[in-house]
Amino acid sequence: MIGAPKRYNHWKRMEFLVVLVIVLLGSSIKAYGAINQLCWREISNINNQGPYFGIVVPNAFELNPLLQSSSFVPHNKFPYFDFAGRHFRIGELKMKKVIVVMTGESMLNAGLATQLLLTLFNVKGVLHYGIAGNANSKFQIGDVTIPQYWAHTGQWHWQRFGDKDEDNGDFNREFGYLKFSDYNNYTKHSKSVKNLLNKVWYQPEKIFPVDGTPEVWQSAFWVPVDKTYFEIARNLKNVELSNCVNKTCLPRKPIVVRVKNGVSANVFVDNRAYRDHLKSKFDVTPTDMESAAVALVCFQQKIPFIAIRALSDLAGGGSALTNEVSIFLSLASQNAFDVLVKFISLL
């Protein structure tokens, strides 16, 4: 985590370079993707009111609790800014200046929205919240989890059938694999057979830190959230959370808990065997499709980050509750937002 003065100077240098380019090019900026002078003027007006906390939300049903909350007050002069298909909402949440963006589902959408947020605006920290599948049967629907580390588990090296683990290959073997034959349906004689799908090895991302050498990458698998933010999250245990939807109630009151690991990939995990694999391999609790992308962008940009994810279902089923997501979606979304509100009030 970089210090506030250094972060401020970095932002001012970026802003100066952007303004210089605009002055030199003048009104001739026509290229696709370029930002015209009118947009930059509006962005500058917004940034002059900053810095802000960036709030990154995956989907509309997770955003709704914020929009319906009296805790969120839109800015009276520039309540929003639209750019590149994104609607950036500017305002205050619990008296803290915020810019809110909905990403849409998936790693690509989450990464793009987060990068735009950090490129356009003067953001001093990113707070990400939403719902997640649960890979840890120790917890229940409605519980709000705050992982210390996030990983993208959708980047694979798919090993050729017949190759042995010790065979040469330009891929990482540090983070383990998924062996498909471990999940074969055996014959009545329980005869083990090889699986043509062989195995996939989990691979780290190649990132390019903002303070690094251009085009020189670094590996990143487990991405830590900000240490200060994670420590502040200790004080969230007593947040009062909802446990009923109409007349359908959870077995116990939901809790807020800091956990070790969360994972993300462009995969909606609704399979018990893979859920158990993620838990045993990586000690995972929440699994979703966005958080690791947000984490990786913030990690590269040296911006403090934390993710708050409420559990909406036991991935792959198997709990005492049926139709979990359809019933408890709104409850989980509200619980995640309620924890966010408490968290930002502590900053």
Image: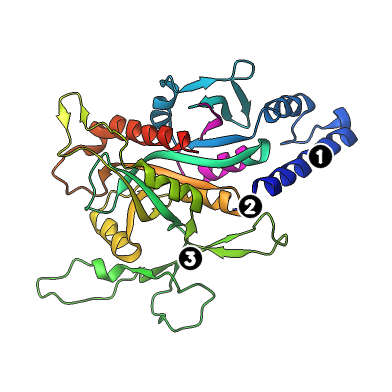
Cα–Cα span, label 3 and label 1: 38 Å
Q: Earlier in the sequence, mark 3 or mark 1?
A: 1
* Residue on which the image places disc 3: 203
Q: Residues within 10 Å of mark 3 (few under 14, many from 20)?
A: many
Tell me the SS state at disc 1.
helix
Q: Nearer the viewer, mark 1 or mark 2?
A: 2
In the rendered image, the vertical position of residue 257 relative to residue 78, given as above or below: below
Q: What residue type is labelled 1?
A: Phe
Q: Which of marks 3 and 2 is nearer the N terminus?
A: 2
Find out whether residue 293 is within the magenta segment. Answer: no
Circles 3, 2 touching at the beta carbon (< 8 Å): no
Q: Earlier in the sequence, mark 1 or mark 2?
A: 2
225 vs 155, nearest the viewer: 225
In the rendered image, the vertical position of residue 43 relative to residue 5, given as above or below: above
Q: Residues within 10 Å of mark 1 (few under 14, many from 20)?
A: few
Q: Is residue 107 visible?
A: no
* Residue on which the image places disc 1: 16
Q: Position of residue 84 (x, y in %)?
A: 63, 32
Q: Is residue 332 visible?
A: yes
Q: Residue furthest right?
A: 24
239 vs 165, nearest the viewer: 239
Q: Position of residue 208 (x, y in %)?
A: 64, 58
* Residue on which the image places disc 2: 2
Q: Residue at x 50, y 38 (%)?
A: 347
Tell me the SS state at disc 2.
loop
Q: Residue at x 26, y 37 (%)?
A: 325
Name which quarter of the figure residue 158 lies in: bottom left
Q: Tell me which segment is drawn in magenta.
A: 95-117
Q: Which residue is drawn at 74% across and 45% down?
A: 9
